[in-house]
Image (spheres, rainbow, N blue to C red):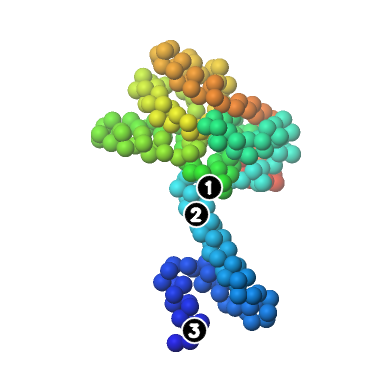
């Protein structure tokens, strides 16, 4: 067995596939005199770090269960000049996540709230944070199922765990007493962690949707007063999805 084959076997045993994948190219560079001994080792280590970072990002994005792996780079801000691009780009710095704050994106149907919410979630994944995306109705149904099979605590902890939880279509309809109680527990459990909410109604219009004013105040005080409120307005992207309609540039930012 040659020294190279021994090295390949060692790298495979140590599960250093990033080094293994680039070994041939790095050896060629070293043979050509482009890399000294220390530089050769350094670039191989950097190759392994890059491979691990890429794999970790892919894992976080997969676990987030985004409907679309949208990014801000794909969003066509020019289509809707009313969308506050500067505000959204500032949120993309993720200072709100570091501060344990939340984001509320509200406005009419189809202006891109869901895509922006997912893009911010994707940005969080890029920065090493964990994220999860879910329709609010499905989250509430999941927690309700936990009451039925006695797994409610486990389910609550699962939704409380991500650094960023994206609740799409929040406050679409009135909440039941049980749903309001579950929301209260979730928000309390997630103290210090960020939400990103999308809604067709402004936060001031959410209070009547809760059956108990005291519970409503407890929930919304925690959400609204620690959130960045972003009103998104403008033309809807959804007509561009109709059969025979020419698609606009950018992603599919409906929501």
| Residue 52 x %, y % | 51, 59
Q: Quadrant of residue 81?
A: top right
Q: Are marks 2 and 3 in contact (CB under 8 Å)?
A: no
Q: Which residue is mark 2?
A: 56
Number of dots carrying numbers: 3
Of the two numbered discs 2 and 3 on the same chain, state the one appearing first in sequence: 3
Residue situated furthest bottom in the rendering: 1
The mark nearer the N terminus, 1 or 2, is 2
Residue wearing tag 3:
3
Residue at the image point whose x is 48% and y is 22% from the top: 222
Q: Residue at x 64, y 43 (%)?
A: 72
Query: Residue at left 55%, top 36%?
Result: 98
Q: Secondary structure at mark 2?
A: helix
**In the displayed image of the protein, which residue is found farthest to the front?**
38
| x then y, percent, for residue 87 | 68, 32
Residue topped by disc 1: 128
User: What percent of the width, then of the height, locates residue 210?
Assistant: 43, 17
Give yes or no for contact between labels 1 and 2 (Cβ–Cβ under 8 Å).
Answer: yes
């Amino acid at each position: 067995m040659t020294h190279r084959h021994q090295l390949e076997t060692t790298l495979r045993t140590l599960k250093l596939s990033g080094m293994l994948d680039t070994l041939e190219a790095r050896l060629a560079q070293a043979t050509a005199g482009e890399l000294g001994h220390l530089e050769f080792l350094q670039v191989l280590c950097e190759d392994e770090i890059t491979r691990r970072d890429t794999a970790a990002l892919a894992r976080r994005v997969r676990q987030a269960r985004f409907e679309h792996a949208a990014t801000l780079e794909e969003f066509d801000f020019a289509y809707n000049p009313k969308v506050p691009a500067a505000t959204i780009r500032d949120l993309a710095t993720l200072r709100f996540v570091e501060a344990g704050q939340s984001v509320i994106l509200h406005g009419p149907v189809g202006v891109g709230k869901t895509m922006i919410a997912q893009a911010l979630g994707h940005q969080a994944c890029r920065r090493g944070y964990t994220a999860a995306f879910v329709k609010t109705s499905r989250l509430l149904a999941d927690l309700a199922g936990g009451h039925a099979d006695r797994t409610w605590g486990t389910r609550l902890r699962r939704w409380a765990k991500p650094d960023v939880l994206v609740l799409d279509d929040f406050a679409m309809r009135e909440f039941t007493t049980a749903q309001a109680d579950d929301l209260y527990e979730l928000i309390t459990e997630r103290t210090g962690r960020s939400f990103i909410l999308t809604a067709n109604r402004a936060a001031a219009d959410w209070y009547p949707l809760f059956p108990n004013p005291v519970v409503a105040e407890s929930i919304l005080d925690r959400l609204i007063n620690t959130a960045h409120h972003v009103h998104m307005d403008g033309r809807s992207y959804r007509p561009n999805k109709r059969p025979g309609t020419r698609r606009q540039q950018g992603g599919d930012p409906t929501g």
